[in-house]
């Protein structure tokens, strides 16, 4: 059961972040609606992953290896690795825990790891049988023997594990520095973020995307495709504006001015059927597809605008800017 929980735990966290729209982007990236930034900075992700893997390796050593076949130093290193995993789990809990939302669920897996880690260390110490050390006749030999014997005494493993954490972390930091990680990446991973307990940055305010309307949602696709060119105001919220959205709104204005009764019917039908579709659009890739699907309608809207407006481009350009201060 322990192994299953250690495997499913990270998967559950990924599922939760997807469900609650927590996105793996840097703190300075502007998000939409209820989206939030990830609690770990991209700059420190590799470091955190390596430390987490060490925690898993330590657990596997202590849980599944036959102690009688292992050198004492390997056992001590396994305990050090578990200590590192426990320390990492504590930091995760400090970063994400809150009683104001369901984000406290993110702390359940690291808490579970802490309990499992402490349990496997305790069992390792209780199950170990002290080994006999060879005695040396010389004074130097007896000193070495005394130092060596400390590794064979299980009650010493607790503090030896803490001591060995320092060189292990030093080696990890030096190695990761060679791969482009900063020496302080273990700290930046938690502080170079926004929206979380240890965050030291404030992200730009989220842009509100009106999910009732397909054209508005389509404007949230990839920039190279949907080509947003400014911000606007819609229903009291700042929104991303592209030409397709402006054309659609200008077309609706003309319908409302020229044939208000028919406009009301069209609006009712669109609200009833467009909203359920738009509500399901969460991915920018799907928004790209909607943008392309709306292209024929956009050309039709342009045709009507140019037929019934003396200054069609002025009307299009004025969409969503009248209330901007």
Image: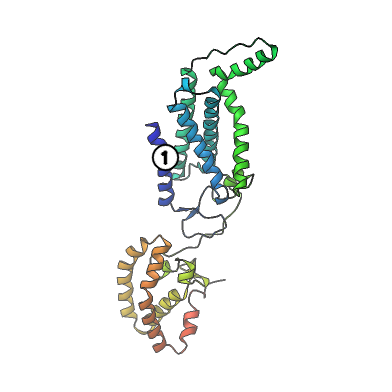
Of residue 57 and residue 185, the one placed in the foreground of this image is 57
In the rendering, at what x and y percent does residue 124 appear? 48, 22
Of residue 268 and residue 107, the one placed in the foreground of this image is 107
In the rendering, at what x and y percent does residue 264 appear? 33, 76
In the rendering, at what x and y percent does residue 235 appear? 45, 67
The answer to whether residue 299 is above or below residue 112 is: below
In the rendering, at what x and y percent does residue 246 appear? 45, 76
Q: Quadrant of residue 325?
A: bottom right
- Single out the residue that lies furthest toward the front: 137
Q: Using residue 277 as the reference point, say whether residue 242 is left or right of it.
A: right
Question: Which residue does the image show at 32% across and 63% down from the upper left?
Answer: 276
The answer to whether residue 38 is above or below residue 268 is: above
- Single out the residue that lies furthest toward the right: 139
Q: In which quadrant is the N terminus drawn?
A: top left
Question: Which residue does the image show at 35% across and 60% down from the upper left?
Answer: 280
From where the camera sits, is residue 176 visible? yes
Question: Which residue does the image show at 46% across and 34% down from the upper left?
Answer: 113
- Crowding near the residue tagged with mark 1, few <14, some 14–19, many ≥20 C-alpha atoms within 10 Å: some
Question: Which residue does the image show at 52% across and 14% down from the upper left?
Answer: 131
Q: Secondary structure at mark 1?
A: helix
Give the image's coloring scheme.
rainbow
For disc 1, the marked residue is: 9
Of residue 26 and residue 256, the one placed in the foreground of this image is 26
Picture mark count:
1
From where the camera sits, is residue 211 visible? no
């Amino acid at each position: 059961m322990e192994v299953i929980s250690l495997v499913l735990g990270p998967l559950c966290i990924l599922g939760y972040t997807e469900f609650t729209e927590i996105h793996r982007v840097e703190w300075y990236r502007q998000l939409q609606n209820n989206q939030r930034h990830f609690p770990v900075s991209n700059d420190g992700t590799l470091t955190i992953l390596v430390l987490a893997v060490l925690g898993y390796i330590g657990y596997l050593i202590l849980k599944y290896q036959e102690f009688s076949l292992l050198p004492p130093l390997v056992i001590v290193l396994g305990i050090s690795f578990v200590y590192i995993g426990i320390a990492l789990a504590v930091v995760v809990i400090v970063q994400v825990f809150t009683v104001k939302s369901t984000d406290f669920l993110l702390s359940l897996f690291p808490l579970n790891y802490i309990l499992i880690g402490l349990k496997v260390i305790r069992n390792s110490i209780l199950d170990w049988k002290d080994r006999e050390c060879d005695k040396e006749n010389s004074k130097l030999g007896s000193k070495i023997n005394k130092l060596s014997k400390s590794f064979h005494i299980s009650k010493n493993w607790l503090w030896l594990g803490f001591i060995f954490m320092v060189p292990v972390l030093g080696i990890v930091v030096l190695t990761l520095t060679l791969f482009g990680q900063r020496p302080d990446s273990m700290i930046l991973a938690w502080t170079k973020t926004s929206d979380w307990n240890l965050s030291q940055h404030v992200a730009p305010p989220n842009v509100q995307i009106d999910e009732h309307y397909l054209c508005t949602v389509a404007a949230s696709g990839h920039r190279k495709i949907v080509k947003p060119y400014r911000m606007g105001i819609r229903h009291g919220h700042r929104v991303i504006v592209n030409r397709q959205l402006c054309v659609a709104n200008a077309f609706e204005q003309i319908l409302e001015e020229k044939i208000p009764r028919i406009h009301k019917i069209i609006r009712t039908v669109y609200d009833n059927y467009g909203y359920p579709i738009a509500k399901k659009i969460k991915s920018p890739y799907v928004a790209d597809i909607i943008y392309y699907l709306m292209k024929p309608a956009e050309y039709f809207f342009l045709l009507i605008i140019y037929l019934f407006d003396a200054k069609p481009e002025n009307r299009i350009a004025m969409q969503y800017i009248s209330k901007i201060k």
